[in-house]
């Protein structure tokens, strides 16, 4: 078991509050159903990873989708950079372990990928997983420092390169993970489901996606 913790930063999957870029073509209820499936895939992948601690930094309330073995902490901050920085800080304050943080947007993530990230963090200062939309799906820090994230403009095509440059300019030795697709749009959803056909997300998309344009 690796001496590290994995933090998932997520929103409670409530209709009208999650995956709003999926509406249209999906309804708010369908988008929330897809978000719930993506979150469950992510949490179960984390649950199967060999780490000491598992943390959920949550906006909202936990539900039946949360497996056993997670410590739930509230999100803090206004912008995403603040909430990410706070999640790193709060998890590390709770458990003095290196932190690998992921979101709920990559339901194709596997325990093997997460185990690789944790292993890399044992020999590197940071681990970075780029997303195809220009952001990042994973960030690991052996010694979490909020200043590494605060002020990075999020949800832009340049977010990932800006964050990676910030890490390297600070002098950190950064290991890279494979690129994954975030689920932001309907096209993303169908692409991710095709690459993870046995996932809860793919099953949920099959249930609600009939007649939706790809």
Image (cartoon, rainbow, N blue to C red):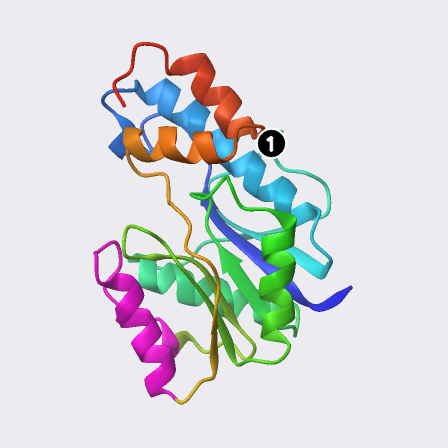
Q: Number of numbered discs present?
A: 1
Instruction: Please state the horizontal and vertical placement of residue 85, each as a whole percent of the image.
Output: 41, 67
Within the magenta stretch, is there residue 99? no
Q: Nearer the viewer, residue 135 or 21?
A: 135
Quarter of the image holding residue 200?
A: top right
- Magenta span: 147-170
- Quadrant showing the C terminus: top left
Q: Residue at x 56, y 57 (%)?
A: 7
Tag 1 residue:
65
- Please indicate, yes or no, whether residue 155 appears anywhere in the rendered image: yes
Q: Please state if 184 lies on the left or on the right of 145 as rendered.
A: left
Q: Is residue 42 above or below residue 164?
A: above
Residue extending farthest to the right is 1
Q: Badge 1 local density, few (<14 within 10 Å), some, or many (20+)?
A: some
- Please indicate, yes or no, whether residue 13 appears anywhere in the rendered image: no
Within the magenta stretch, is there residue 159? yes
- Quadrant showing the N terminus: bottom right
Residue extending farthest to the bottom is 171
Q: Residue at x 71, y 60 (%)?
A: 51
Q: Nearer the viewer, residue 157 or 190?
A: 190
Q: Please state if 185 lies on the left or on the right of 96 as rendered.
A: left
State the SS at label 1: loop
Residue extending farthest to the top is 211
Instruction: Please state the horizontal and vertical placement of residue 165, each as a whole percent of the image.
Output: 30, 77
Q: Residue at x 65, y 72 (%)?
A: 97
Q: Is residue 211 above or below residue 213?
A: above
Instruction: Please state the horizontal and vertical placement of residue 123, each as a whole percent of the image.
Output: 61, 80
Q: Please state if 212 lies on the left or on the right of 55 as rendered.
A: left
Quarter of the image holding residue 160?
A: bottom left
């Amino acid at each position: 078991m690796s001496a590290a913790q994995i933090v998932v930063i997520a929103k409670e999957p409530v209709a009208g509050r999650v995956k709003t870029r999926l509406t249209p073509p999906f309804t708010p209820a369908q988008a929330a159903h897809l978000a719930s499936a993506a979150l469950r895939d992510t949490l179960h992948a984390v649950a199967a990873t060999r780490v000491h601690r598992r943390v959920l930094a949550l906006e909202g309330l936990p539900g039946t989708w949360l497996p056993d073995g997670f410590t739930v902490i509230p999100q803090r901050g206004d912008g995403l950079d603040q909430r990410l920085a706070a999640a790193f800080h709060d998890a590390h304050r709770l458990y003095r372990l290196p932190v690998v943080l992921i979101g709920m947007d990559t339901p194709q993530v596997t325990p093997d990928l997460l185990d690789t990230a944790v292993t890399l963090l044992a020999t590197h200062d940071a681990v970075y997983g780029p997303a195809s939309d220009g952001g990042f799906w994973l960030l690991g820090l052996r010694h979490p420092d909020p200043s590494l994230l605060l002020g990075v403009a999020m949800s832009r095509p340049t977010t990932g390169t800006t964050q990676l440059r910030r890490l390297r300019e600070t002098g950190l030795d950064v290991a890279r993970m494979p690129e994954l697709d975030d689920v932001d749009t309907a096209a993303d959803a169908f692409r991710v489901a095709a690459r993870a056909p046995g996932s809860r997300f793919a099953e949920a998309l099959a249930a609600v996606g009939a007649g939706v344009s790809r």
